[in-house]
């Protein structure tokens, strides 16, 4: 995961431990033993993906959570296999769980997209640096490529908003802000839409 410059002089065991440490930390801790700016583009991208996924539910980590990611993958596989129910470890998962996982990922992607567009418009940094900061903020990770302190006031407000949103959880925030509506007991006709 790291470039040879960072671990070139280290023994093999230290290289492995350093790489493992760097692959676990983007899940939540924000600690780093290397200068992230010296990592390759592929390593930065992998860290962004790990920050987006985050840790397991019930932990203090941010991101969409590992279970949400797993359910999304299983749901995709079921769709390709044309299975109607999702079975994991001989247990059938509730259909609402798959819908909620899709909603969480969609909301996170929309928030990342909007924040990235806004920061790209007002900040002079590269897309890589901005996406890294945005995903780190919404994943409540704490890693940075060094631009956080250099952001404008509006940029800092965007990052702070992402941090609060990531900590509280997008679905929780949306549920708190939305009004409860009583749905009438009407059965609507089914419409098939072509996708993919």
Image: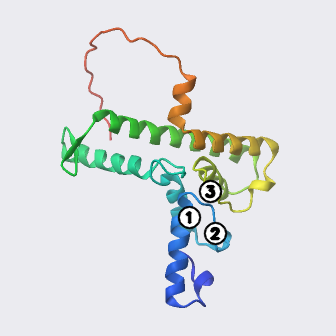
Pointer 1 local density, CA inside 10 Å: few below 14, some 14–19, many at least 20: many
Number of residues whose C-alpha sits closer than 10 Å to that of mark 2, classed few (under 14), some (14–19) or many (20 or more): some
**Mark 2 and mark 3: span between their CA atoms?**
15 Å
The answer to whether 17 is drawn above or below residue 117 in the figure is below
Pointer 2: what residue?
32
Q: Earlier in the sequence, mark 3 or mark 1?
A: 1
Of labels 2 and 3, the one closer to you: 2
In front: label 3 or label 1: 1
18 left or right, relative to 118: left
134 up-or-down from 2: above or below: above
- Say which element carries label 2: loop
Task: Write down the residue under mark 1.
Answer: 25
Q: Secondary structure at mark 1?
A: helix
> Measuring 53% from the left and 17% from the top, which residue is drawn there?
179
Mark-to-mark CA distance, 2 and 1: 7 Å
Instruction: From the top left corner, tell me how far across and down residue 30 is, in percent.
Output: 63, 61
In the image, taking residue 116 as reference, residue 23 lies left or right, namely left
Cα distance, mark 3 to mark 1?
A: 14 Å
Q: Residue at x 68, y 41 (%)?
A: 118
Q: Which residue carries the number 3 mark?
A: 132
């Amino acid at each position: 995961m790291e470039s040879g410059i960072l671990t070139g002089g280290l023994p093999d065991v230290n290289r492995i431990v350093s790489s493992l440490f760097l692959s676990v930390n983007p899940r939540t801790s924000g600690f780093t033993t290397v200068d992230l700016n010296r990592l390759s583009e592929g390593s930065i991208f992998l860290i962004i993906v790990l920050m987006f996924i985050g840790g397991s539910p019930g932990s203090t980590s941010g991101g969409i959570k590992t279970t949400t990611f797993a359910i999304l993958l299983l749901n995709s596989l079921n769709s390709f296999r044309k299975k109607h129910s999702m079975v994991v470890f001989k247990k059938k998962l509730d259909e609402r769980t798959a819908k909620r996982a899709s909603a969480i990922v969609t909301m996170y992607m929309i928030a990342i997209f909007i924040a990235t567009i806004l920061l790209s418009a007002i900040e002079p940094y590269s897309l890589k640096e901005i996406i890294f900061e945005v995903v780190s903020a919404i994943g409540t990770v704490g890693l940075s490529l060094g631009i956080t302190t250099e952001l404008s006031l509006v940029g800092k407000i965007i990052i702070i908003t992402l941090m609060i949103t990531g900590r509280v959880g997008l679905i929780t925030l949306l549920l708190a802000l939305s009004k409860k509506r009583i749905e009438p007991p009407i059965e609507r006709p089914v419409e098939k839409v072509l996708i993919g």
